[in-house]
């Protein structure tokens, strides 16, 4: 079943059936002002922090309410509806709607009873408030009188938890007043006599506003209960049904902002106005509102600026391949998803309620990878930040607080850090993610001097980027288990695998092996012979251990418990085949060719499903060892044999590195949101963004996906597709073009900005192979192999690669 389609010219996903199987959402705003909105206008907003800056309320795990509602009432018939299908929910036989989610804006259009409405929701670029730009047109043959009402439900406290659970407190600190063109909500208004700069028990007066510009306010309400009316809901608010609001504020109870305007429209006539929401003090509110006196002169321009900004970023990498699904994901939606995970980490969605108090180390370092080819200047800022969250022993802080203060942080070795963050110990993998991320950044930009940039450690001291990376290797080498492989510590990538100080992780060992490859390149560049020799020796030892201990006939095992028990051997009754050690054996360069192909074949045989490859199989139930936390989940869910979407990126990459274009693309399609657009009722979440996992074959809901938007999948799949399938593999001095594509593809194109040059790349595949390079021409000149040295690049560079 389909609920919409991709409009790639506008880079919008268009929802034509509003009764989607779940709220399908979009992100508006920036770290200064975050806003999330569903296709039925449900959602919330916050200034800076989802936990402590919550402005608009949302009830999680419920029916997508409340939201940014616009009600329209025909004053003659007294019939009313909403500009988004919900909350009023008119019969879809008579109510037509279209929701267009674009890059940082959402447009809702509706036609009902001869009235066309369009609402454009957005947060203007570099501004910290939101705009709901409304346009209403009379498409009927009679003059119409309409009351249009905007509704914003304020939280009673900026702290999300206090608003939700501490009602005996939060209801008695809030009040609303009417200020002509806006409802002002004040929290702790009674502190207005306290001297500026001081506070009472950390509290100060906080002001929010809900305003109407471009039309006259004819009635207003600042009290949620009065607006809704007892035993009414958002679908039939008393204030809307009655045609006029009560003109009363709120004191002690639940605040809201509701503003009505009456418009009279002749046939064919339209009107435009704007509602605005924000958390600002009055003088600034007046300034902002003054600039929206004529919304028709402002809103269109602001939307254009937003589109230019985002489309400008996406323009750094655009493709044209025979697959519409692949194009839509790589050009727009996977890319936009990467930016959202980069910005929001795991903070705020309809599943993450906004309470995360920091950045997960591994998540954030991986998220960066997804935007390097699009916005390296944004990436490097975050890389610096994450390097400054590396402890001087080389490990990463498992959780980097939003208040992170480089050089002054406590670490997992301090009780204070453990108490504050809830993270009791180091994880084995965190700092190892720095290697591919730093390497990808330097290779993309050619910014080799970055290796010498000095960056503080989280707790004390500072060092060059190169030294930071060396310390990350030291951390692993100083935390080895019984066989001399890296210990699993509190967790590796898999949060549900607790292997401890003595147990060992094959995945981390492969990450370390890979990290040594990368550091070796850096050491060579820096002519650091001592480090290069050390790495050669240690990598060889590690490689031997992995081959001797971890290869189990046709697969790599997952690791060892503290008691030395093998996890993931082929004879185990449960969890005998794991996805990540197979893909990482290839990515790390550890697996020999025949081993790699055998392991990948086994993955396809044992783990692949129509929705992607399962993380491990069979699920844990009766044979879980002590550290196998996955057993807490239902079979087929999450780490217990779910199709963990993040791992799909690695299997795509591994197949592509082996030149298996058909397989790589099969894995992409099985789990790609866009490829499931016409089976949306099975996948449930949005067909334009990734989720954390899809329920595996052991689940009765096989194929259903969960935890939308904020997932490491965005970046791993992006890397799998860009480096793997499309074969864009920069190194320090240029670019390898090594595609691994489905053999049916005859040709594809890439437009890529690379080190200040615009590359137009055409890849031709007349012989229908899956990989390989027959010849490569750059501006008409034949290159050696598949490599383009930087010196041959011109501002506009024409590249043709013949695969066969
Ligand atoms: O790797 C983790 C991630 O950090 C958080 N979500 C689950 C993943 C797999 O356990």
Image (tube, helix red, strand yellow):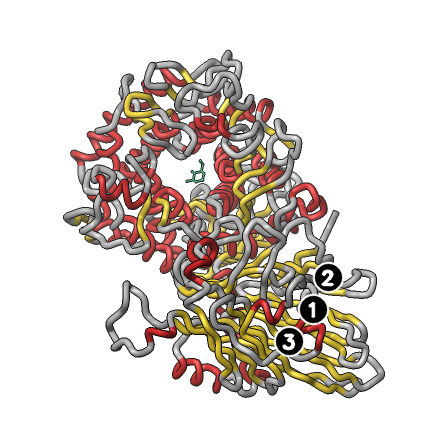
Viewer-proximal residue among 538 and 486: 486
Q: Point out residue 391 in the picture as x, y percentages from the top left corner.
A: 22, 43
Q: Residue at x 48, y 60 (%)?
A: 316
Viewer-proximal residue among 741 and 202: 202
Residue identifier under label 3: 149
In the picture, the disc for residue 592 is none
Q: Residues within 10 Å of mark 3 (few under 14, many from 20)?
A: many
**Could you tell me which quadrant the C terminus lies in?**
top right
Within the displayed image, which quadrant is ligand 1 positioned in?
top left
The Cα–Cα distance between marks 2 and 3, rounded to whole angstroms, is 16 Å
Q: Please, what secondary structure does the residue beneath circle 3 have?
A: strand
Residue identifier under label 1: 82
Q: Please, what secondary structure does the residue beneath circle 1 have?
A: strand
Tell me which label, 1 or 2, sits earlier in the chain.
1
Q: Is residue 767 left or right of residue 552?
A: right
Count of residue discs: 3
Q: Is mark 2 within 8 Å of ligand 1?
A: no
Residue closest to the far right: 141
Q: Residue at x 50, y 64 (%)?
A: 56
Res 377 → quadrant: bottom left
Q: Residue at x 52, y 33 (%)?
A: 655
Res 88 → quadrant: bottom right
Q: Point out residue 569 in the picture as x, y percentages from the top left corner.
A: 46, 15
Q: Residues within 10 Å of mark 1 (few under 14, many from 20)?
A: many
Q: Point out residue 43 in the picture as x, y percentages from the top left corner.
A: 56, 60
Q: Are marks 1 and 2 in contact (CB under 8 Å)?
A: yes
Q: Is residue 51 left or right of residue 644?
A: left
> Can residue 794 be seen?
no
Viewer-proximal residue among 669 and 173: 173
> Can residue 400 be seen?
yes
Tell me which label, 3 or 1, sits earlier in the chain.
1
């Amino acid at each position: 079943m389909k609920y919409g389609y991709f409009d790639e010219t506008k880079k919008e996903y268009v929802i034509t059936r509003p009764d989607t199987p779940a709220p399908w959402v979009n992100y508006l705003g920036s770290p200064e002002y975050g806003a999330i909105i569903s296709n039925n206008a449900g959602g919330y907003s916050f200034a800076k922090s989802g936990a402590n800056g919550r402005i608009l309320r949302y009830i999680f795990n419920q029916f997508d309410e409340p939201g940014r509602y616009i009600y329209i009432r025909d004053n003659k018939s007294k019939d009313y509806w909403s500009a988004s299908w919900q909350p009023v929910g008119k019969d879809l036989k008579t109510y037509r709607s279209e929701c267009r989610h674009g890059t940082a804006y959402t447009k809702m259009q509706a036609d009902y009873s001869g009235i066309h409405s369009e609402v454009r929701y957005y947060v203007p670029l570099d501004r910290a408030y939101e705009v709901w730009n409304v346009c209403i047109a009379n498409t009927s043959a009679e003059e119409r009188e309409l009351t249009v009402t905007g509704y914003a439900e304020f939280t009673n406290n900026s702290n999300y938890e206090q608003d939700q659970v501490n009602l005996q407190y939060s209801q008695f600190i809030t009040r609303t007043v009417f200020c002509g063109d806006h409802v002002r909500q004040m929290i702790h208004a009674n502190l207005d006599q306290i001297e500026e700069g001081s506070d009472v028990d950390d509290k100060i007066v906080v002001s929010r506003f809900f305003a109407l510009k471009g039309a006259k306010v004819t009635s207003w309400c600042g009290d949620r209960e009065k607006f809704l009316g007892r035993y009414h809901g958002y679908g039939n608010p008393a204030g809307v049904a009655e045609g006029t609001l009560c003109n009363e504020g709120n004191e002690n109870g639940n605040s809201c902002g509701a503003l009505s305007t009456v418009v009279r429209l002749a046939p064919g006539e339209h009107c435009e106005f704007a509602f605005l929401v924000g958390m600002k003090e009055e003088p600034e509110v007046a300034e902002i509102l003054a600039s929206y006196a004529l919304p028709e002169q402002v809103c269109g321009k602001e939307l254009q600026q937003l589109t230019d900004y985002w489309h400008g970023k996406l323009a750094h990498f655009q493709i044209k391949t025979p697959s519409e699904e692949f194009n839509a994901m790589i050009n727009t939606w996977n890319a936009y998803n990467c930016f959202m995970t980069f910005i929001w980490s795991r903070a705020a969605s309809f599943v993450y309620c906004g309470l995360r108090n920091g950045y997960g180390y591994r998540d954030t370092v991986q998220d960066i990878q997804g935007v390097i080819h699009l916005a390296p200047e944004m990436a490097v800022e975050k890389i610096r930040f994450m390097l400054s969250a590396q402890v001087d022993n080389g490990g990463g802080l498992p959780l980097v607080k939003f208040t992170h203060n480089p050089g002054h942080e406590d670490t997992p070795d301090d009780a204070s850090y453990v108490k504050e963050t809830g993270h009791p110990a180091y994880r084995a993998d965190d700092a190892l993610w720095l290697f591919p991320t730093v390497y990808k950044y330097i290779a993309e930009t050619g910014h080799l001097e970055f290796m010498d940039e000095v960056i503080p450690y989280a707790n004390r001291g500072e060092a060059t980027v190169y030294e930071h990376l060396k310390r990350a290797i030291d951390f692993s080498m100083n935390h080895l288990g019984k066989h001399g492989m890296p210990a699993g510590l509190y967790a590796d990538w898999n949060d549900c695998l607790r292997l401890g100080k003595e147990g060992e992780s094959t995945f981390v060992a492969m990450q370390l092996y890979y990290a040594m490859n990368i550091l070796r390149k850096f050491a060579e560049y820096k002519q650091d012979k001592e480090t290069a020799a050390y790495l050669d020796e240690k990598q060889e030892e590690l490689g031997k251990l992995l081959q001797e201990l971890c290869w189990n006939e046709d697969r790599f095992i997952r690791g060892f418990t503290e008691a030395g028990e093998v996890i993931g051997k082929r004879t185990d009754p449960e969890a005998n085949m794991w996805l990540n050690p197979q893909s990482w054996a290839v990515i790390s360069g550890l697996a020999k060719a025949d081993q790699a192909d055998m392991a990948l074949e086994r993955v396809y045989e044992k783990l692949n499903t129509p929705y992607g490859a399962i993380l491990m199989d069979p699920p844990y139930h009766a044979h879980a060892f002590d550290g196998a936390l996955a057993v807490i989940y239902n079979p087929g869910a999450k780490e217990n044999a779910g199709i963990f979407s993040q791992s799909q990126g690695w299997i795509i990459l591994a197949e592509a590195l082996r030149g298996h274009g058909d397989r790589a693309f099969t894995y992409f399609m099985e789990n790609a949101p866009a490829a499931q657009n016409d089976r949306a009722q099975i996948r449930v979440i949005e067909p334009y963004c990734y989720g954390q996992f899809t329920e595996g074959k052991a689940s009765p809901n096989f194929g259903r996906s969960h935890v939308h938007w904020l997932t490491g999948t965005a970046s791993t799949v992006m890397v799998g597709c860009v480096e793997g399938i499309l074969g864009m593999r920069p190194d320090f001095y240029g670019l390898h073009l090594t595609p691994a594509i489905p053999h049916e593809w005859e040709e594809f194109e890439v437009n890529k900005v690379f080190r200040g040059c615009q590359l137009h790349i055409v890849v031709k595949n007349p012989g229908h192979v899956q990989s390989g390079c027959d010849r490569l021409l750059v501006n008409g000149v034949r290159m050696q192999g598949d490599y383009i040295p930087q010196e041959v690049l011109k501002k506009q560079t024409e590249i043709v690669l013949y695969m066969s």
